[in-house]
Image (cartoon, coloured by chain):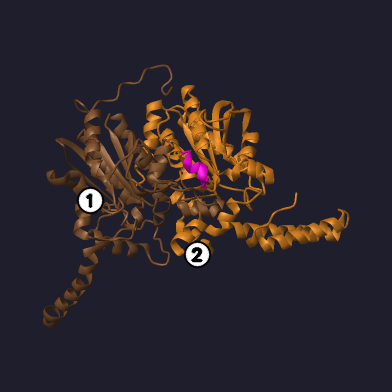
C-alpha cells in the first residue's frame, strides 16, 4: 500500500493535473470560435469580449456574479429518492447520476442560496445546465420547492435562473409531475405577496419553460438565450421547414411579447436589484382578501 | 366496420377471420357448423382475454393510439346532455385540438374540456391530431375560469400525443400557455376531475390534467415523453421505442403504484375500441364517483387538497 500511495498515486495525480491545466487556460467562444484567455473571460463575466456571446455558466459562477463580495449562504436541499423507477438506457441512470455528482459534490441541477442584494435579503435558485442538461426530476423539484418555502418563511423575493433541457426522462412521470409541483410553489409565493423573478438563460426548454420558468412576475433573459417549449430539432423534424433566423432566441421572444426585457449579463445584477427595490419599496405585501362575490379573474 | 388489428393481434385476426368466413357460409342453419362457430368464438375470446391480460407497455401504447378507440366526441355524445360547445381563446384563434363546452353530466351542470383527436383524415387534420397550440390551452383556461365563476365542476378528458411543436405555436408562447394551464388547474376552487383516455403526452397533457382526481383507462398511457422521442434522445435510435416504453413506467398500473394517478378504470376485454359503449359507461361511473366525493368539499379546501396532492409527489414513501 505504501508504495502505491507514496509513489504511484502522486504520479497519476500529477499526470491528470498536467492534462487538465492547459484545457482550463483558454476557452473557445462558442459564438465566434475565438480562443480567449480564461482569466480574461472570467473578468468579462463569461461574455465573449470579441462577439458578446453569453457563455453558459455553472451555478457557482452564477451565484458569485449575483451576490459578489457580499457573499451568500447555501440552503440545503433535502434529499429525495434517487433512481425512483430504476431506469436504464445505454447506461444505468444510477450510474449516470453517480458520475454527474462527482463533478458537483453531490448536488443536482438546481442549487439554492440566500444572500444580500444591495442590502436586501433574497433567495436565489440557480439551474446548472452542466448537470444532466439541467433536467428537472425530483431533486430539481425539491430544490425549487425548498427555495420558495425559504422565501415565504423569510418574506424574501425569489430570483430563479433557469437553464434546462426539460423534464428528466430517467425519472419518468415523477419528473413530469414536478411541473405542477413547482407551480404550486410559485402560487405560494404569489399569495404571500412576494416577487418571483425569472432570468431565463441559455438554454431553457421543455417542462421547465412550461412550468415555473414562464410564471415569473417579471421575466428577464440573457441575450441570445434559446428559450422555448419544443427544441428546434424536434420542430424541424416535425414541420420539415427551415426555422426563421433567430427563432426561439431571447430577442425573438421579447419581440413576440413573451419577456419583459433582455438584459446583458453585466447589467443583470443592477437590474434585479432595482426591480426588487421597486416592487418592495417598504417590504413585502400580503395578498388582499378576495371579495366575497363577483369575478375573481376579470 | 372492418376491425383494425394491431400487429400483436395477428392470432386474433386469423381466428376472427375464420369465424367470419364460417358465419357467412353457414347462413345460420347448418347445426354442425354452428357448433364449430361456437367453439371458434370461445377460442377467439379466450386468446383475446389472455393476450390483453398481459399487454406489454409498448402494446398498450399501440392500444392507446388505436384509431377506433373512443375519443372526446364519443364520450361527450354519450355522457353529456345538452352539450354546448364554446370556442376561442379571446386573444387570437379557436384551436380545435382542444374542445370544450357546457353540458349536463348525469343531472349536474359541468364544464367539459378535452383533447379532440378527430376521426377520419379530414377530422384529424381539422383537430390537428389532438396536438394543441397555445390557443387551445388558453381556451381551456378561459373555460375553467368560467366554470369556476358559476361553481361548476370541470371534467377534462386527456388524449394527446403532446403539444404541437411548430413555429407558430412557439411564436405564440406554447410554454407560457401550458404553464398558465397548470397554474389555472391548481388555482380553481371548483372540483376538477381528469381522465386519461388514450395518450397522455407530456406537458401538453398535464396542462389540463392537474386535477383533484386523475383517473386513467386501463390501457391508456401517460408519459413524460413519447416512447419514440425518449428512444431517440436517450438511445439515439427511434427504433428502441419498445425498450423506452418499458423503461418509462407509463402504464396505468405503474402510475397508480407511483401515486401519479388516483384510480384505474378497467377496459373491456380486447380494449376500449372493441366495446366503446361499455368503456364510456365505465368512465362515466368513475367520474360520477369522483364528483360525488368532491362536490361537498368547500372551495378553499378543494384547491388546497389539489395543491397538496401535487406538492407531495416528491418520490418519498407515504403511508
- Percent position of residue A26, x then y: 24, 63
Image vertical order of residue B127 relative to residue A96, above or below: above
Residue on which disc 1 sits: A45
Q: Residue B37 vs residue B48: left or right?
A: right
Within 10 Å of disc 2 (Cα), the crowding (few <14, some 14-19, many 20+) is few
Q: Give the chain coloured brown.
A: A
Could you tell me if the residues under marks 2 and 1 are in contact, i.e. CB atoms within 8 Å? Answer: no
Residue A170 appearing in the image: yes
Q: Nearer the viewer, residue A92 or A198?
A: A198
Whether residue A144 sits left or right of residue B273 in the image: it is left
| The quadrant where residue B8 appears | bottom right
Location of mark 2 (residue)? B237
Q: Foreground residue, A1 or A298?
A: A298
Residue A161, image x, y percentages: 29, 45
Residue segment shown in magenta: B162-172
Q: For residue B151: magenta? A: no
Q: Which chain is home to disc 2?
A: B
Amino acid at each position: 500500500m505504501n508504495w502505491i500511495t507514496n509513489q504511484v498515486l502522486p504520479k497519476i495525480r500529477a499526470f491528470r493535473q498536467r492534462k487538465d491545466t492547459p484545457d482550463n487556460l483558454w476557452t473557445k467562444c462558442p459564438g465566434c470560435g475565438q480562443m480567449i484567455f480564461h482569466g480574461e473571460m472570467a473578468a468579462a463575466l463569461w461574455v465573449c469580449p470579441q462577439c458578446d456571446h453569453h457563455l453558459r455558466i455553472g451555478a457557482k459562477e452564477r451565484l458569485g456574479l449575483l451576490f459578489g463580495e457580499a457573499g451568500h449562504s447555501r440552503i440545503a436541499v433535502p434529499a429525495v429518492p434517487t433512481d425512483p423507477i430504476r431506469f436504464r438506457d445505454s447506461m444505468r441512470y444510477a450510474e449516470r447520476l453517480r458520475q454527474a455528482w462527482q463533478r458537483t459534490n453531490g448536488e443536482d441541477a438546481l442549487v439554492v442560496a440566500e444572500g444580500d442584494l444591495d442590502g436586501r435579503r433574497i433567495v436565489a435558485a440557480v439551474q446548472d445546465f452542466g448537470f444532466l442538461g439541467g433536467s428537472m426530476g425530483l431533486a430539481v423539484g425539491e430544490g425549487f420547492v425548498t427555495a420558495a418555502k425559504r422565501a415565504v418563511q423569510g418574506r424574501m423575493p425569489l430570483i430563479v435562473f433557469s437553464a434546462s433541457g426539460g423534464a428528466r426522462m430517467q425519472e419518468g412521470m415523477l419528473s413530469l409531475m414536478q411541473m405542477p409541483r413547482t407551480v404550486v410553489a410559485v402560487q405560494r409565493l404569489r399569495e404571500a405577496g412576494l416577487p418571483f423573478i425569472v432570468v431565463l438563460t441559455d438554454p431553457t426548454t421543455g417542462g421547465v419553460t412550461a412550468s415555473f420558468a414562464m410564471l415569473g412576475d417579471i421575466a428577464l433573459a440573457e441575450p441570445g438565450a434559446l428559450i422555448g417549449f419544443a427544441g428546434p430539432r424536434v420542430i424541424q423534424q416535425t414541420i420539415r421547414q427551415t426555422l426563421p433566423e433567430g427563432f426561439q432566441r431571447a430577442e425573438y421572444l421579447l419581440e413576440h411579447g413573451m419577456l419583459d426585457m433582455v438584459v446583458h449579463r453585466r447589467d443583470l445584477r443592477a437590474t434585479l436589484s432595482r426591480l426588487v427595490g421597486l416592487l418592495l419599496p417598504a417590504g413585502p405585501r400580503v395578498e388582499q382578501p378576495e371579495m366575497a362575490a363577483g369575478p375573481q379573474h376579470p | 366496420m372492418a376491425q383494425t388489428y394491431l400487429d400483436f393481434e395477428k392470432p386474433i385476426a386469423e381466428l376472427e377471420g375464420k369465424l367470419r368466413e364460417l358465419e357467412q357460409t353457414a347462413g345460420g342453419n347448418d347445426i354442425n357448423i354452428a357448433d364449430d362457430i361456437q367453439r371458434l368464438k370461445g377460442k377467439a375470446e379466450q386468446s383475446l382475454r389472455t393476450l390483453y391480460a398481459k399487454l406489454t407497455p409498448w402494446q398498450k401504447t399501440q392500444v392507446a393510439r388505436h384509431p377506433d378507440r373512443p375519443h372526446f366526441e364519443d364520450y361527450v355524445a354519450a355522457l353529456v346532455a345538452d352539450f354546448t360547445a364554446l370556442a376561442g381563446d379571446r386573444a387570437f384563434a379557436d384551436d380545435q385540438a382542444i374542445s370544450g363546452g357546457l353540458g349536463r353530466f348525469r343531472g349536474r351542470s359541468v364544464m367539459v374540456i378535452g383533447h379532440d383527436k378527430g376521426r377520419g383524415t379530414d377530422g384529424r387534420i381539422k383537430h390537428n391530431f389532438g396536438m394543441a397550440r397555445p390557443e387551445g390551452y388558453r381556451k381551456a383556461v378561459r373555460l375553467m375560469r368560467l366554470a369556476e365563476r358559476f361553481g361548476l365542476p370541470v371534467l377534462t378528458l386527456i388524449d394527446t400525443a403532446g403539444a404541437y411543436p411548430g413555429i407558430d405555436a412557439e411564436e405564440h408562447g406554447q410554454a407560457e400557455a401550458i404553464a398558465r394551464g397548470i397554474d389555472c388547474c391548481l388555482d380553481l376552487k371548483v372540483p376538477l376531475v381528469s381522465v386519461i383516455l388514450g395518450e397522455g403526452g407530456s406537458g401538453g397533457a398535464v396542462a389540463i390534467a392537474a386535477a383533484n382526481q386523475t383517473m386513467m383507462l386501463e390501457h391508456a398511457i401517460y408519459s413524460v415523453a413519447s416512447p419514440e422521442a425518449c428512444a431517440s434522445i436517450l438511445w439515439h435510435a427511434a427504433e428502441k421505442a419498445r425498450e423506452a416504453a418499458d423503461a418509462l413506467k407509463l402504464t396505468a398500473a405503474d402510475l397508480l403504484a407511483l401515486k401519479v394517478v388516483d384510480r384505474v378504470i378497467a377496459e373491456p376485454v380486447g380494449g376500449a375500441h372493441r366495446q366503446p359503449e361499455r368503456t364510456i359507461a365505465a368512465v362515466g361511473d368513475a367520474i360520477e364517483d369522483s364528483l360525488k366525493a368532491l362536490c361537498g368539499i368547500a372551495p378553499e379546501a378543494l384547491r388546497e387538497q389539489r395543491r397538496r396532492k401535487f406538492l407531495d409527489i416528491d418520490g418519498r414513501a407515504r403511508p
